[in-house]
Image (cartoon, rainbow, N blue to C red):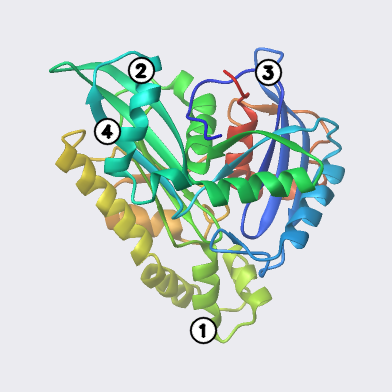
Amino acid sequence: MISLPFKKKSSTISIDVGSSMVKVIEVDRSEKVPKIVHFGISKLLPEAIVEDEIMDRNLVVESIIECIEQAGVVGKEVVTAVSGRAVIVKKIVMDKMSEEDAAEAIFWEAEQHVPFDIDDVCLDFQILNEDIGANQMEVLLVAAKKDMVNDYAELLRDAGLKPTVIDVDSFAVQNSYEANYIASEENMDEVIGLVNIGSDVTNINIIQNNSPHFTRDISIGTNNFIENLQKELGLDYEGAQQIIKGELGEIDEAKVKDIFRKQVTDLSLGIERSIAFLKAAGDADKIDKIVLSGGGARLPFLTEILSEKHDIDFSIHNPFAQVEYEEGVFAEYEEELDAIAPLLTVGIGLALRKAGE
């Protein structure tokens, strides 16, 4: 099933299967402040998943099992998420009706908005505004290709797990952001861009008052920066990865910055199109601030370059701002926890939720 960003409670195990690694996080929500009680991470070989397509199932299943064992979780029910070109998220207008009636009508509405055969997709929706006038309401529609959803569900089953929710990456990021920042924000009218940069895909979600205005995925990620560094500087994969981590060594900083400035064009275009869409739809004139997450959030010079290019305040999401973790959970990563924190945003956002609520 596809699940939209409703508030979730209780203890939940999340599996975030990315193109370069698998992350497992369990969050206990029995107390007022959510707490991470288990964590595991396992790297994937580059050929295991390419552009969200599972190329080697056995490698992915083995990584999931390894990650579960490393984390020490005992539960079998898990939540996960998907993203990419096979996922469509769109805000639509429907005739005003009850949620029960909307559940029937959404299939007819989806045929007008989803560029896939309606029989080949999983659908879900959330009513954003029950009355926008003229006897109409605003609805968030989500569609994902069944083949992709089933593939990810089968991966988890093959690893001995039971998937209870298959969510969308951008909504998991929103859930993490809201849990860590929204409660302390004074200006709920701010238009906030949540940009999650993965290995192959970047999720863009523009929110205001906890509601998504515009959501899209673009095919650019850290792998694009790695490939360009290899090409421009004659580096091997490992050498390019070191630069991605901010370890420039003897390489000229100005040259690296120039390479990144050129490579960031596609990402900038995605942000510009988001702003243009908001203006055209009459939702907002501008984005007040943008928060980066994912493995690419800490790319060297990225926040500086993007801030200059768009004249918007860019910052890096801290998924631990209002989420605690048990002592020892991140013992192996204690010295680099700040660096890997944005990488855990989707997993933590998923683990802050529970199926059926």
- The tag earlier along the polypeptide, 3 or 2, is 3
The answer to whether residue 94 is seen in the rendering is: yes
- Quadrant where the C terminus sits is top right
Q: Which residue is mark 3?
A: 10
For badge 2, the amino acid type reads Asp
Residue in the picture at 44% in, 61% down: 219
Q: CA distance from mark 1 to mark 2?
A: 55 Å
The quarter of the picture where residue 89 lies is: top left
Q: Nearer the viewer, mark 3 or mark 1?
A: 3
Q: How many marks?
A: 4
The quarter of the picture where residue 128 lies is: top left
| Residue 231 image label | 1
Left or right: 133 as drawn, with respect to 357: left
69 up-or-down from 45: above or below: above
Q: Which residue is mark 2?
A: 101
Q: Nearer the viewer, mark 1 or mark 2?
A: 2
For badge 4, the amino acid type reads Ile
143 up-or-down from 137: above or below: below
Q: CA distance from mark 1 to mark 4?
A: 43 Å
Q: CA distance from mark 3 to mark 2?
A: 30 Å
The answer to whether residue 318 is seen in the rendering is: no
- The tag earlier along the polypeptide, 4 or 3, is 3
Q: Report crowding for label 1: few under 14, some 14 to 19, many 20 or more residues within 10 A (C-alpha).
A: few
Residue 348 percent coordinates (x, y)? 63, 35
Q: Nearer the viewer, residue 20 or 306?
A: 20
Q: Report crowding for label 4: few under 14, some 14 to 19, many 20 or more residues within 10 A (C-alpha).
A: some
Q: Nearer the viewer, residue 114 or 265?
A: 114
